[in-house]
Image (spheres, rainbow, N blue to C red):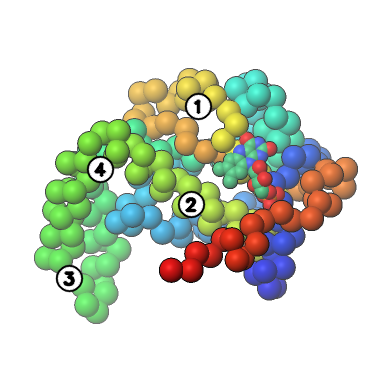
Amino acid sequence: MNIIDSLKWRYATTDFDSSKKLSDEQLENLKKIVRLSPSSWGFQFYKIIVVEDQDLKKKLLPAAYNQSQITDCSHLFIFCSYKEVFESDIDKLIADMHETRKNDKDYDEKGINSYGEGSKDIILKMDKAKQLEWLKKQCYIALGQLMVGCAEMRVDACPMEGFKNEEFDEILDLKDKNLLTAVILPVGFRTSKDKYQYRSKFRKPSKDLFEDI
Ligand SMILES: Cc1cc2nc3c(=O)[nH]c(=O)nc-3n(C[C@H](O)[C@H](O)[C@H](O)COP(=O)(O)O)c2cc1C
């Protein structure tokens, strides 16, 4: 499948067919795709909640300005950023990195430890507001990768920032978990009534997008 065709096929779906659900295999593949997202330092300081439960979706609906994608999608991916990074978060990731790489031919135990120390020196010393801004950006990288993956799999999706973050956090009980909702992605299958799929794709012309210097 040609990636350009996939990206032309995709659009921000506003009308999902609520009777159509992802298969278990499709869901597993989407999870694999998002898990493979790159992130700064490779640390993925976020968690992803996948909501399928219709009652929970209904609770979230008003907090998303009643946008019907929330309840009509098959699965709702919710990208939750860490609110703050603690030394213990990095220690855990570094321990996992040792575990993953310990049988590599060029396993560099000392190198991994100094990578951890170097990252602490930068990440833990960040101003907290800057750190949070940086943490949320990591969620958007994962969002982008998942959206492209959806398109390749011919699964529809709609990236959404149009929701009240604090209300989502409350409903999802994130307050005491060092997590906050950054961005969401309902996924599923379009209806033929969704008019947006028929509109010509509007993007900046290349000459305006790419800056000559
Ligand atoms: C970060 C982000 C947030 C968005 N939030 C919403 C939203 O809350 N509701 C919605 O219907 N569309 C939302 N969109 C969809 C955009 O309007 C859409 O992607 C854009 O108009 C380009 O159209 P296309 O994705 O169909 O090609 C969002 C898109 C992005 C990337």
- For marks 1 and 4 on the same chain, the one whose residue lies earlier in the sequence: 4
Residue that label 2 marks: 142
Q: Quadrant of ligand 1?
A: top right
- For marks 1 and 3 on the same chain, the one whose residue lies earlier in the sequence: 3
Mark 1 CB near ligand 1 (8 Å cut): no
- For marks 4 and 3 on the same chain, the one whose residue lies earlier in the sequence: 4
Q: At which x and y percent is residue 125?
A: 17, 41
Secondary element at image label 3: loop
Q: At which x and y percent is residue 108?
A: 17, 70
Q: At which x and y percent is residue 77?
A: 57, 41
Q: Disc 1 or disc 4, which is closer to the eye?
A: 1
- Three-letter amino acid code at disc 3? Asp
Q: Within 10 Å of the Cα at label 2, are there few (<14), some (14-19), or many (20+) other Cα atoms?
A: many
- Three-letter amino acid code at disc 4? Asp
- In contact (CB < 8 Å): disc 4 and disc 2: no
Secondary element at image label 1: helix
Seen at 73% across and 45% down, the residue is 13
- For marks 1 and 2 on the same chain, the one whose residue lies earlier in the sequence: 2
Q: Within 10 Å of the Cα at label 1, are there few (<14), some (14-19), or many (20+) other Cα atoms?
A: some
Residue that label 4 marks: 89
Q: Is residue 4 left or right of residue 124?
A: right
The answer to whether 91 is drawn above or below residue 184 in the figure is below
Q: At which x and y percent is residue 180?
A: 42, 31
Residue that label 1 marks: 165
- Three-letter amino acid code at disc 2? Ala
- In contact (CB < 8 Å): disc 4 and disc 3: no
| Residue 25 visible in the current orientation | no
Residue 108 tag number? 3
